[in-house]
Amino acid sequence: MENQSTTGELVLARMRELADSRTAWHRGLWQPGTLVLLDEVIEAVLATWDGSLTSDEAMKDIINTTMTQVLRDPGVGDQTVREALHELLRQLRPSGNAKSKPTPDLQQLLDRTVALAARSRTGYVLRWIEHVESVGIAPEQVELASRLLVAHLLDEGFHRNHVHGWLVAQGRKVELAAVLRRGREMLVQSRRTFTFCVGVVRAPLEVREALKEHWLDSDTYTKRFRAANNPKRRPVPRAGAGAIEWSAEARDPHAAMYELLEWQQKLVARVQLGYGQGDKIEFEADVIDATANKIRTPLEDRRSIRVPAIQRSRLFVGGADSGQRLDGAIGLLASHSGEIRGASIASVWAAAEGLLGRPGGKGTDVADRLSDIITCSFPRAEVGDLARAWADHGSGELFDALQGLPSADQARLMAEHLANAGDPGFESAADRAAAARYIQLAADPVGVLERVRNYYNSVCRRLYYHRNFIMHAAKFDSVTLGVSVRTAPVLVAAALDRVVNAEQGKNPVSPLALAARAQNELSLVGTTGARPLHLLLD
């Protein structure tokens, strides 16, 4: 068995990184956990049968993704259970051109899938603990284990900031199995009720009357604010219209604050449309967590998305030089708000389709072009981060060679070193894990990039299917809607960054031309005509 203290350390480092909202897109979490994927299969099958999804394509894609992940996830069950579930999914998957219909045989297959998925849900983390203690985690399984475990915690309702803080609190010397046992204890605890006092700067009288059962006067709110624990020394708000006392059941305080932000956004939207003005109601940024008697700032939990090429190209004004399509995509992506999930999905997809769609083309084609661009950007982002880290904190000849070089040359040197000499000696476990990923990529570029593209393609196609659910079936409660809100905007922003960079270069390249280039370069990987991995789009 491999040195499990080393691989366990890498798994925990990656779990901390995956849960951290500050993590760059190429090191982030892209997929849901296996149990939620199984729920998504069931939802897609039923939606196809009742006509909410008008073609079999979504059902096929979701089943294909789930079949792959089921076989690789020891938390689902032993090999026989995973193979049985895989076979049920294979038989459910539509074949040929005829649309899938709820025949008695297929309904029985779905019932069996539902039952076996429920069986897998019980004891999921316990099976992972048994796997770690009996079989162990091989070096090539570090990435998979980290992703599946963090995804499971998020799918169970924990907020990523809570998961990150919890993992950090475990310390650096603890064994992976011990952390998983504590995680299992956390998972079996019931949801708790959290109550917040939310200061209201201004609100129409009719709104205050509608909320009178939850309304607090301004003096009461100010007194409670002064009495609460205020570790960040947030200023006491000025006297406003009053405050609202609001409660929610959630796994943790961060998850409860997310629910609070969602409720606030819905209220603001109704007031804005009801009065025709957007400034009729305004909330204080800080809230009192009455459950813990602590001042919190919910907006700090928001994950911002960024397109660095806008800053690099000084593309702040826009207009004719930047192109209407690009301006439109930037505006749509900037309007993304994770709290109003349906609007977020619609705006993020519209940004992608506005850049990469063709008249009369299919939405899945847009998703495929998007994932091609992101996949081609992945190696450069990975090796570029490692080059910067070694240039800042490394040593030796590679450290000296990296100093003062342009980023492209730094990436080249680091890529060559990793492929030929391996990890130069990164101290950070997260960087060691990233170095191991790039070494695997260099050794098997076709296989690794195909796997990476499948992850990204799943995110992009899921975004498209959710847009269809919302726009054509008025379905705002899909089981993986939250997963799309968590993953898709960051990846669309990464693709938009490459689009801006290509359009603003010395030899401008349109978004569709960039996507065509990406498809070509991916098809040539592993051949004598392939470009270096860190230069696929340069």
Image (spheres, rainbow, N blue to C red):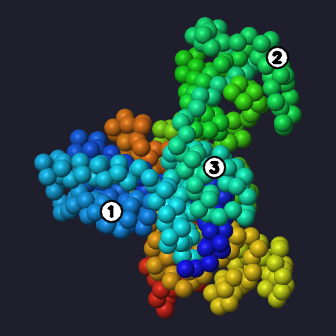
Q: Which image quarter: residue 389? A: bottom right
Q: CA distance from mark 2 to mark 3?
A: 32 Å
Q: Amino acid at mark 3?
A: Val
Residue displayed at 66% across by 74% down: 6
Percent x, y of residue 251: 57, 38
Mark count: 3
Where residue 163 is drawn, which disc sits there? 3
Residue displayed at 53% across by 67% down: 132
Percent x, y of residue 177: 59, 62
| Residue linked to disc 1 | 81
Is residue 421 in view? yes
Residue placed furthest toward the left:
104
Q: Amino acid at mark 2?
A: Lys
Q: CA distance from mark 1 to mark 2?
A: 58 Å
Q: Amino acid at mark 1?
A: Val
Residue displayed at 25% across by 59% down: 88
Label 2: how many Cα within 10 Å (few below 14, some 14–19, many 20+): few
**Foreground residue among 321 and 38:** 38
Label 3: how many Cα within 10 Å (few below 14, some 14–19, many 20+): many
Is residue 465 in view? no
**Foreground residue among 423 and 471:** 423
Q: Secondary structure at mark 3?
A: helix
Q: CA distance from mark 3 to mark 1?
A: 29 Å
| Residue linked to disc 2 | 223
Q: Which image quarter: residue 267? A: top right
Location of residue 454 with respect to 320 vertically, above or below? below
Q: Secondary structure at mark 1?
A: helix
Q: Which of the two marks, 3 or 1, is nearer to us in this view?
A: 1
